[in-house]
Each structure stands twice: as structure tokens, then as C-alpha cells.
Image (spheres, rainbow, N blue to C red):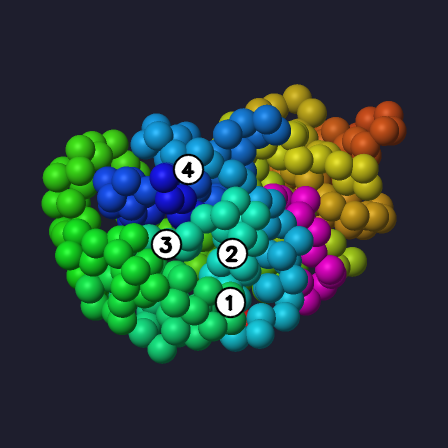
Amino acid sequence: MAKAVGCVSGGLDSMLTVRLVQRQGIEVLALHAVHLWHPHTPAPGEKPEAVRRVEALGAEVRTVDATEADLAMVRHPKFGMGKRMNPCIDCRIWTLRQAKALMEAEGAAFVFTGEVLGQRPMSQRRHVMQLVEKESGLEDLLVRPLSARCLAPTKPERDGLLDRDRLCGFAGRSRKPQIALAAELGITEYPTPAGGCLLTDPGFAHRLRERMRAKDVTPADVELLKVGRHFRLDDGEWAVVGRHERDNLRLADLIQPGDVRLEATDIPGPTTIVRGPADADTLAQAAAITLRYTKTPPGETRDVTVQAVGELPWTIRAAPASDEFCRERLVTIEEKS
């Protein structure tokens, strides 16, 4: 039986392509890249939801860690960025190079993706799709089953390994053809269309850009950027304040050596994390911001418990920061970058 490597995200398009290739009698080995920019990072040892979805289709799934590549592409994108911070072309090329290596190692005949011509404004235009094929080393061996009949025949089609007439000719942004095909192929459970990459989210992209101006961002910093409200402090460090209980629990998990945790001592309120070395003035600002998101009346002072990782806790007496102070320090998309 012939084998093909499919690049899968776990969305409907990639699920459809797996089924389209499988029904032509070809074994599918799926490759899923685990990116930093996914909104929900799997817990250690947990399978990404995308992997579970594709495994349910009867395909073996391999994963590849894209962490270091993700940071490198954002720092120095060879082919530029989209509207926000998304180096989509570089990312596509990197993923396809991993798929090509897997194809060669496994003796597979070709690589396929769930791309649809014209669906994405940056990476799925015809000339960009051709560029990606060339840069990834997959010219004539990269099949897009959902748009195959809109594109030039590939070697697997010309050789008869794939019946081109049983592939699709989708183009554009409408999802109706995919939904109809899902019903035809018996795929009933799939995620609703949504942005799966935080780099296209205005708020996250802005926070990342601003943080990168101040320091060399690490994977741990990226995880912190996904949570809570973010405030600049006077020494260039940031305070991250939980918005609700889920944020507070997540912040507790993300704390690392060098961080300082703050919480109102005797009343309900948020968890605040200050990342990096912080002097007394910086911590006083973070304590005041923390109290702003409690029910402490303006001008009234309260104790805030402060604890650096690995040290004993202490308290700071502070009054809630003013709304004006918080607005000035809050990192929001409305700011001009």
C-alpha cells in the first residue's frame, strides 16, 4: 500500500484531506506541529486535541515541537509577516520541510495539506503556494486535495497514484463546500472555524511585539502573554494580573524562579505575577495594581502578600492604584506601536 504524509492542524480542512487520501487506498501518516502560538497549550503528557481528532480517523499521527522555530521565525521572518505578527509563509515552509523529511524517512510517495486556494490572504494565494513548494523542496510532490482541480496536476496524480477526479476544486473563503463534503464523508464532529494562531489576534500580537522590544522573549514568557491583564512597571518589567479564577490558577502554574507573586492578604482578589528582578518601588506599583481589582475603596490601604519564588513571604501596605494609573500602564491594542 502506498503511503503519504499529511500536515494536519486538527481543523475540518485537514480532517477532510485525510479522508480524501485514505479513500483512494493510501495509508496516511499525519504530522502535527505543536506551536507556541496555539491558544491552549497541552499539559505535559497530554495529547493535543488535533492529534486525537486525526487519530479518530484511523491515521497514525507524529508530532514535532515547533517552539524554537516559532521564536526564530517571529524574530527574523524571511518572507515577512501578515497583518499582525504572523510569519505564515515561513511557518508553512518550516512545517513542510519537516513533512518532507518524514516522507523520505518513511518511504512515502507525497505530502498533502488541507490548504484551500484563496482561503488565507497571506499564505494561500496561488503564487505563494508555488513559492512554498519550491522553498520546502516539495515541488511536484505537494498535493492540496481540497483545491487539486484548481491547481496543476502533481506527480502522484499524473502517475495514477491519486485519481484527480476524486479530489476537489474548492477555492475562496466559503466553508459551505467543506461542510457538505464532511457530511458526505461521514465526518460529523469537528471544530468550528476559528483563528487557531494567536499571532493573528490583535491583543496578543501587540503584547508580544511590546515585550520583544524590552527583552528576548522565551517560551515561558509566551505562555504568560496568553493570560490576564498586562501592565508595564517603571523598571521595564511587567505585572500580569489574573482576570478571573481560571487566570489565577493558570498564573500559579506559570510562576518560575525569579518571579514574584502578589495577592491581597485578607480579601478576595487576583493573583499577580511580576516576571524578573523587581525592586521595592516596582513591587509597590504591582501591589497597588493588584488592589485595584479588589473591592478595596479608593484611598483605603490593605496588606498585599508578596512572595518571590523560593523565599519567605512578606507584606506590603498599599492603596489601590487609580484608574488613570492603570490605563497608562495597561498594554492594550489601542496603543500605537
Q: Residues within 10 Å of mark 2 (few under 14, many from 20)?
A: many
Q: Residues within 10 Å of mark 4 (few under 14, many from 20)?
A: many
Instruction: Report the residue that reaches farthest toward the bottom.
Output: 127
Q: Residue at x 75, y 36 (%)?
A: 256
* Most foreground residue, 141 or 207: 141
Image quarter of the N terminus:
top left
- Residue corresponding to mark 2: 100
Instruction: Give the x, y percent position of residue 246.
Output: 51, 29
Query: Closer to us: mark 4 or mark 1?
Result: 1
Q: Residues within 10 Å of mark 3 (few under 14, many from 20)?
A: many
- Residue corresponding to mark 4: 50
Mark sitting on residue 113: 3
Q: Which residues are magenta?
A: 212-224
Query: Closer to us: mark 3 or mark 1?
Result: 1
Image quarter of the C terminus:
bottom right
Magenta span dominant secondary structure: helix
Secondary structure, mark 4, is: helix
| Earlier sequence position, callout 4 versus callout 3 | 4
* Most foreground residue, 112 or 207: 112
| Earlier sequence position, callout 1 versus callout 2 | 2
